[in-house]
Image (cartoon, rainbow, N blue to C red):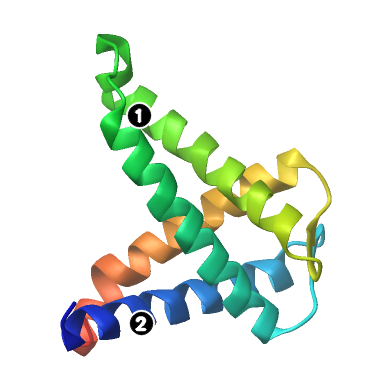
Amino acid sequence: MDMNTYISVAVNVLVLSVVVFLIAKLLPAIRMKSFATAVVVAVVYSVINILLERLMTRLPMPGILKEAYVIGLILVLLNALMLKVTEMLIRDFKIKNFGWTLLASLLITVSFWLITKYLLPLTGVL
């Protein structure tokens, strides 16, 4: 990997850390000890995401699963499951129930996407 790849990964983890931290402060059902915990959550979540993405790209998909709306629903559920696994692995990060996990996952996904798609390119960071 070259230096740009390392910088891109570091920026993505930092952005995800900030997003997770702010959403944890916004939602009353999420408990997070500190910003350092948000960084750990971002790293663990990213690793799980990479592993799951590699697994999913190797699995054959039935035709119905290729529809855009179904893919969107599946992604929301997969992101929520990844967030739940992350929560189970980190002692200082707790979410009250799966409903809150779904909401947090949706907010994290949309916020991260908006920032990395529209805001960061304006800054020239990515």
Residue 107 in the figure: left or right of residue 46: right
Q: Residue at horizontal 54%, vertical 76%? A: 17
Q: In the rendered image of this protein, does residue 109 appear above or below residue 7?
A: above
Residue 106 in the figure: left or right of residue 72: right
What residue type is disc 2 on?
Val
Among the two numbered marks 2 and 1 on one chain, the one whose residue lies closer to the N terminus: 2
* Quarter of the image with the N terminus in it: bottom left
Label ID, residue 125: none
What residue type is disc 1 on?
Ile
Tell me, yes or no, whether the two marked residues, 2 and 1, touch with CB atoms within 8 Å.
Answer: no
Label ID, residue 11: 2
How far across and down, in percent of the image, does residue 102 sit?
63, 43
* Mark-to-mark CA distance, 2 and 1: 27 Å
Q: Residues within 10 Å of mark 2 (few under 14, many from 20)?
A: some
How far across and down, in percent of the image, does residue 36 sit?
66, 85
In front: mark 2 or mark 1? 2
Q: Residue at horizontal 15%, vertical 82%? A: 2
* Label 1 SS: helix
Residue 31 in the figure: left or right of residue 18: right
Q: Quadrant of residue 55?
A: top left
Q: Nearer the viewer, residue 70 or 7?
A: 7
* Quarter of the image with the C terminus in it: bottom left
* Label 2 SS: helix
Q: Residue at horizontal 45%, vertical 63%? A: 111
Q: In the rendered image of this protein, does residue 20 appear above or below residue 71?
A: below
The residue to which callout 1 is attached is 71
Q: In the rendered image of this protein, does residue 101 appear above or below residue 73?
A: below
How far across and down, in percent of the image, does residue 107 sit?
54, 55
Q: Quadrant of residue 125?
A: bottom left
Q: Residues within 10 Å of mark 1 (few under 14, many from 20)?
A: few
How far across and down, in percent of the image, does residue 62 sit?
29, 12
